[in-house]
Amino acid sequence: MGLLRRRSASPQMPATPSIGFTFRPTPDATDRLVSLGATVYVAAQAKVLYVQVFKAACSSMLWAMSQMVGMDPADHGLSTQLHVNRALTIHDTSLHPVPTIDQVSDELRHEALTSSEWMRVAVVRDPYGRFYSGWESRKLLLHHGPWDGYPQPPLSFVDGLLDVGASFRDFARAAHEHRGIWQGDFHFAQQVHVMALDEIDFTDIVATTDLPSLFQRLSERSRRRIDPGRHNEGLGISADDVYDAATAAICEDLFAEDFSRLGFAHRPFTAPRPTVLDAQASAALAMIDERNKRIEDLVAAIGRVEEGEEL
Amino acid sequence: MATDRLVSLASTVYVIEPAKVLYVKASKSACTTMLWTIIDLAGLDTSSIGFAARPSVMRSQVVHDASIHPVPTIDHVSAELRHEALTSPDWIRLGITRDPYARFYSAWESRILLDNPGQWQQFPQPPLVATNDELDVTASFRSFAASMMTHRGIWQSDPHFAQQVHVLALDEIDYTDLVPTTGLSELFVRLGERVGRDITPGRFNEGLQIPYEPIFDAETAAICEDLFEEDFGRLGFIRREFSHQANVVLSGPAKKALDMIHDRNDRIVELSQHLRGLLGRP
């Protein structure tokens, strides 16, 4: 049975819900999670289980989870993992104050996955926006990682200036052709898989557009002020600016289950807006890449020194 | 007749003995390019440079860490070699100079606008003229220039904002060659002839591709001419009138990208501090 049908069968659900659901009772919740471990956070005192969905406000949610257990964001320790800004260091699970489900007792795991007193929450994002954001953050902003080795076209330039929209549309075609590789990565995988939708009985699946009300509820639940801020970095380019009909169709195919099971609607896209970066933005992107590489060097050097090597 | 009277510089004076070239670094005047060039001139491989733990924001800038640069500075060579480098007619004693208007803007862009880490972050300065979505480059630079004039003693103690004649110790070194940045190509040809091989360094100066001329108005130009009076008077640069002004504003992706640069700089600083702590370095 699809989740949307289960949701609409609940008397507490609105008649025409938009995306996901909130406060869905799960009296028949079962402990059957097998596919996730280090992306499922368990805040025992507040009785909140959060499943991380990449490119769906996950940095904000991880800061929120740390606040839920009383950590002042200013006290977050130094991460020596490869993260290009401080906001992203919240992804260092070795520093995060909230344990993941593979680190808690069997009893707590069972309670978190089954108890009707627990909130089991995931945050989901419009697939059009998430697909573009995944590409922008991994490829355009040159966060280096395994995706550097995946099959992909070069970026597209017009008179020496980067054409963001054309580059994304080229990428979308390549990702579609090599979907088995690209969607093996969390940033480009379907959300329903990353959140193990068939293995966790979620009480709350919240769209990124509804985060303020979620933080309000988490504040009430934890009796703490939960105000993590917005940590998603981006160039301010909207998905609406870069999609044409063919690219939208690719997105809808790559993320078919996200559309059908999470309540996101297909939308028409006709003509994308021109999104050629100006000389200053193009130069700034090159500087970002230079700094990303320098951060890689420093992280690698720290690792070598910590292992007793000399620089 | 060249004499050995240098007292005010040490770790910015590089002695390339195999090529008989003494190079004096002037910050914001193609110095990164020149520091890579002298490694080449010395016949060394660029891989001979060690790892820089200091908070350089780019790989190419690690060459500024004199402690790991493979070419010695004048405080690390013998008294005999120092004397020869400063006095011999067989040596080239070389400084690179830059138009003061361009250098002043470039220093502000790299140190303040791009927020590259360093002591200047603690100097008195006005905030950038910016909102979340836009940054007014013209207004920010002009505001900075006026403020720097007020605090010139502090700002011009930093080599990026000091006059070039001081950074070059023009009164203490008998230069054979003072070359403007516009003459670099020809210089590299001459250096290549001197060592019998091509010298072809890349260009390492990063910038936002913002033309500086429209950012200067008469008032800001006058400030620049006052702050760098000796550079104009003694290095042959001409005072100019800036008749065409423009309001340069970073907005949209350029502003967002600038914010990301700042975030990465902060990350580089914290990682560098941690690494230096592990190494027991200050």
Image (cartoon, grey):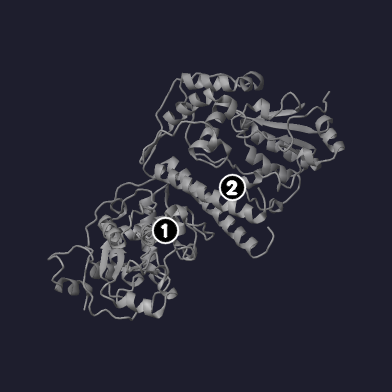
User: Left or right of B113: which side holds B85?
Assistant: right
Q: Residue at x 38, y 53 (%)?
A: A231
The dot on residue B143 is none
Camera-side residue of A252 and B133 = B133
Q: Nearer the viewer, mark 1 or mark 2?
A: 1
| Above or below, B138 relative to A146 | above
Mark 2 — residue? B55
Percent position (x, y) of residue A74?
45, 52
- For the C terminus of chain A, which image quadrant? bottom right
| Above or below, B189 relative to A184 | above
Q: Residue at x 43, y 23 (%)?
A: B244
User: Left or right of B146: which side holds A25?
Assistant: left
> Label 1 marks which chain's residue?
A
Dot 1 amino acid type: Met
Camera-side residue of A13 and B190 = A13
Q: Is residue A299 in view from this perspective?
A: yes
Spatial CA span between label 1 and label 2: 29 Å
Dot 2 amino acid type: Pro
Camera-side residue of A92 and A169 = A92
* Dots 1 and 2 on the same chain: no
Percent position (x, y) of residue A87?
44, 54
Q: Residues within 10 Å of mark 1 (few under 14, many from 20)?
A: some
The dot on residue A71 is 1
| Above or below, B5 relative to A275 | above
Quadrant of the rendered structure where residue A121 is? Answer: bottom left
Local SS, label 2: loop
Local SS, label 1: loop
